[in-house]
Amino acid sequence: MTFNPIPFDVLAGLVNWAKVVGCVFAAVFVIAFLLQIASRGAQGPAFFFRQLVASVMDWLTMSPRRIWALTLLTFREASRRKVFTIGVIFIVLIMFAGWFLGDSTERPEMQVKRYVSFMLTTIGWLILPVVVILSCWGIPEDIKARSLHTVVTKPVKRNEVVLGRIFGFNLIGTVALLTMGVAGYAWMMRSLNEETRGSLTARVPVYGEISWLNKQGNEALQGDNVGDIWTFRSYIAGNTKARAIWDFTGIDEDSFRKNPQTGEPELHLESTFNVFRSFKGDLERGILARYTFVNDSRGLRVSVDPFEVQEFRAGANVMTIPRKITYGPDRSLSADILDDLADDGNLRIEVECLTTSQYLGAAQSDLFIRLPEQSFASSFGKAIFGIWMMMTTAIVLSVCLSCVVKGPVAMLAAGCIIVIGKSFWGFLAKVASGDVEGGGVIEGIIRIHRHITPNVEFQEDSRRQLVESIDKVPQLYVQVSRYLIPDLSQFNMTEYVANGFDIPFSAGLLPALATMLGFCIPWIFLGYLALKFRELESK
């Protein structure tokens, strides 16, 4: 697996969120204040502050009972529109999916990856269009049919209308999502044979920080480059002093697993190393590697037995190391991993390649300590929860847009934001940072006109400075837009489940939850303000 989970910094995210939301609401209030002055003259400021106080009172005095009544009404209206026929499409897809997904000659872990990826991707792409269409057309249809005119004459506030619609559409999506999730899980269990079902795991890894030694044994920023254009991994030269070093922190009793036969504690090390062969050699034998535990403060270096690297086989490179290691020429010495080799919970492991003229590729996430596994059902459920958070974010966005514009326009705008947030948010962030090969918009146009490739620099330095200055304007626009569009890729946790890993809370669920709340809360307030000051007679 090629990702490296990074724990989410809650404090930094909260500070950044407060800055962005504060700027957005400050801009909204200033624009609204100026519009009131322009339309009402000297009475504008007083009217503006009266409406501001009334808006605050709407949120302080809203009724959960009325919100729940609107939620049930929304659910019943959508049910009458036969929205749950989406289940028929889902059933048809999984009925015929087995014809194309099943392959008895394929390795079990690859079959599992294909089935899990298909199921979670199908559920996500089926549920999103349905809830977006419903949410974008809900309030505009109420205004067109004049049913909202009747509602607002009752003791129902505009924020209750917005929340009732959001909760109603979310309830519909939740019921459909749970149904498809349970049905999909049962279908996978039924479609996979007993041997393949054994690969449905939820491993819990503990990652460390990586550092390098070169062929002379000196510290280096990275390993050797073997010419691979993908620089995710660096390589360790075989039978040299080159090493990849992992430093693990927080190692304690819970980091060990008990042997099922003897009950003795063991450390499970799993690796996903890559191999680069400078010559073909014996393909029936793998490249040899070895782990060495190092405690510099005590001057201890304990090496374990070499092992063959199993290429392209996830979960095959697992070494079980007893807590008490015997070493030395005659195995007369022993060292306890926790008491002797770990220094205040910090454990250092060196990895070396023992096969001459061959190279062992390693990245930070290629070696980890494997804790006791979680159930696959819980990991699959977390992935469904990630889809639910993405669905909720899309519903809130769509409902709030429908408070401003009509259904078709809201659906087009919501669709564009979702596509950008799901597929192009990384590129958007790259453009905003200016780290794009070939320069900005104006520079790109000039390069196209002159047939200049992105890796060729401009010859005219003065003109290039002018172009770069002009390009800062659209770059600033992209920087602002990036904060207004959610990174929907945070909700996609298929990679974890498909590769047999449990979804971590700090690096998986927490950033997704923060993204959902961070965007939904201000959007709900903006949608309420738009509906409060909107002319309902406008169809």
Image (spheres, rainbow, N blue to C red):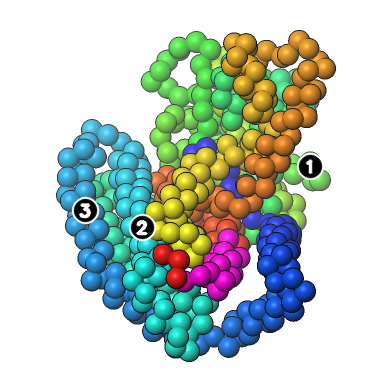
Find the magenta span and give its range. Answer: 519-536
The residue wearing badge 1 is 296
Give the crowd class for mark 2: few <14, some 14-19, many >=20 residues within 10 Å. Answer: many
The nearer-to-camera label among 2 and 3 is 2
Q: Is residue 520 magenta?
A: yes
Q: Which mark is residue 267?
A: none
* Amino acid type of the residue that numbered disc 1 sits on in the rendered structure: Asp
Q: Quadrant of residue 353?
A: top right
Q: Position of residue 234 (x, y in %)?
A: 62, 26
Q: Which mark is residue 89?
A: 3
Give the crowd class for mark 1: few <14, some 14-19, many >=20 residues within 10 Å. Answer: few
Nearer to me, 294 or 113 = 113
Instruction: Name which residue lies at 60% across and 14% down.
Output: 449
The nearer-to-camera label among 1 and 2 is 2
The residue wearing badge 2 is 133
* Amino acid type of the residue that numbered disc 2 sits on in the rendered structure: Ile
Marks 2 and 3 sit apart, C-alpha to C-alpha, by: 17 Å
